Amino acid sequence: MSTSIDRDTGTVPPEDEEVDSLTIGRRIRQLRTDRGMTLDELATAVDRVPSQLSMIENGRREPKLTLLRTIARALGTTLDALLESEPLDERATLEISLERAMRGQTFQALGIAPFRIGKTVPSEALKAMLALQGEIDRLRDERAATPEEARRANVALRHLMRTQNNYFADLEEQARRLLTAVDHPGGPLTQRTASDIAAHLGFTLHYVADLPQTTRSVADIKNGRLYLSSRLASKGDPRTAVLQALSSRILGHREPTSYADFLRQRVETNYLTGALLIPEAHAVPFLQDAKKDRAISIEDLRDAYSVSYETAAHRFTNLATMHLDVPVHFLKVHESGTITKAYENDDVNFPTDRLGAIEGQMCCRKWTSRVVFDEDDHFNPYYQYTDTGNGTYWCTARVELSSEGAHSVSVGVRFDDTKWFLGRETTNRGISRHSVEVCCRRAPADLEASWRENSWPNVRTPRTLLATLPTGAFPGVDTTDVYEFLEAHAPR
């Protein structure tokens, strides 16, 4: 069960803690029956009608705090005992789990109406129903986790981002309130401030060497512990890992119910992380001054906030259209030529598949994102104008290394907006006709004539090409590894 964070204070509100009306109701019933009290007797003791108490015990009504105190006194216990998050016994746990399942989408989709779980229903029957529900959910996840479903989800999400100019006001406000709560003065976010944010949200940080391979971090919500890899310092920005892990807690994310839900959560997490690392209130004046000076530079934004080039580029796309009135596009391209991330609201014409998905397509070899790989100078940014069927675009690009190989990250604008950027004087020029097959996806005629019948490449097929996407609520995560890890590290 997830815990949401209060949007105003960034803290866990009491009504959202690991307690709900079902758990409280079952605890009251268990304590009442253990004491040999009937429902009528308890109702008389607390001056309520039996039907009202029955609704509370069945989790259909949430009792007020004053009534809970009265019930606790009548049962000879304390309010804290009633509010404990763990049910009293295995039977109560099963009943609560099945009650929740009956209120969920799986039972509703099957047309199974909620029913009363009587004492005569065997616990084995409850276990069987829960196991069947779990298997139905697993099969539904497997059907959804196909490459086509992922592309559809990506297209829908990119459409949402474009309609909002990749700017999410509610996430900016979340970041502003949280930074205010930890007294962040503005400018670069330090590692200490990232730790302060964790403490403010009730988490302690623990760096371990045995973090499950399929995870970047693991949050132990019950004990308020956030586990990260002890190898982070040598591999990347430790602030980013902490903030990404905390962002899901800040945003109150619950277990994803679809691949689209998973992607949306990931975008929100990355956005909020960027908004914390590069605060809007401080970055916007910085960028506006740069525009006045006609000296906008992704490198300058990167250096001002001590972040990676990719983080700076992403953050620029969040703020550029809303605050600078500059439409932009963003590309991340693997050294193989495959587009792995894309965003555009400047009418640039990227290659797409029949569903409209850009990710997974081959980037034109004449585009800045591909040409930059051939540059020997990786210290200075690479700039290029590219003529396309949609007009001329200017881009700035960098190559960054990762565990998956080299990637280029590029940001570009329409020709008319180039006047605001450093690097506009470049003489580098390209012509891209990627919407036409002969642009670069087909070899030149003379080469094809010489070699088509005289060559046979042995294809290095990507492992994921013939497989579905990793299944489960969190695709690719081995939950057994995660649970065993948490069990081993939980405080005793």
Image (spheres, rainbow, N blue to C red):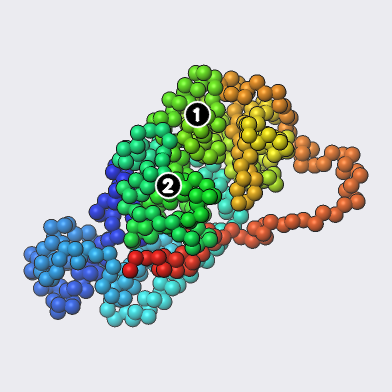
Residue 291, image x and y in percent? 51, 21
Crowding at label 1, few (<14), some or many (≥20) Cα neighbours within 10 Å? some
Mark drawn on residue 243: 2
Q: Residue at x 48, y 56 (%)?
A: 229
90 lies above or below 319: below
Image location of residue 127, percent across then percent down: 39, 76
Q: Nearer the viewer, residue 329 or 302?
A: 302
428 vs 305: above or below = above
The image quadrant of residue 428 is top right
Residue 77 is labelled as none
Residue 421: in sight, yes or no? yes
Q: Amino acid at mark 2?
A: Leu
Q: Amino acid at mark 1?
A: Thr
Q: Is residue 365 left or right of residue 275?
A: right
The crowding category of the residue bearing disc 2, from other C-alpha atoms within 10 Å (few below 14, some 14 to 19, many at least 20), is: many
Mark 1 lies on a secondary structure that is helix
Task: Quickly name the residue at label 1.
Answer: 321
Q: Is residue 170 visible?
A: no
Q: Quadrant of the C terminus?
A: bottom left
User: Which residue is depicted at the point 10% across and 73% down?
Assistant: 41
Sequence-wise, the earlier of marks 2 and 1 is 2
User: Residue 38: image x %, image y %?
Assistant: 14, 76
Q: Which is nearer the eye, 47 or 350? A: 350
Q: Secondary structure at mark 2?
A: helix
Left or right of 370? Residue 32 is: left
- Mark 2 and mark 1: Cα distance apart in space: 25 Å
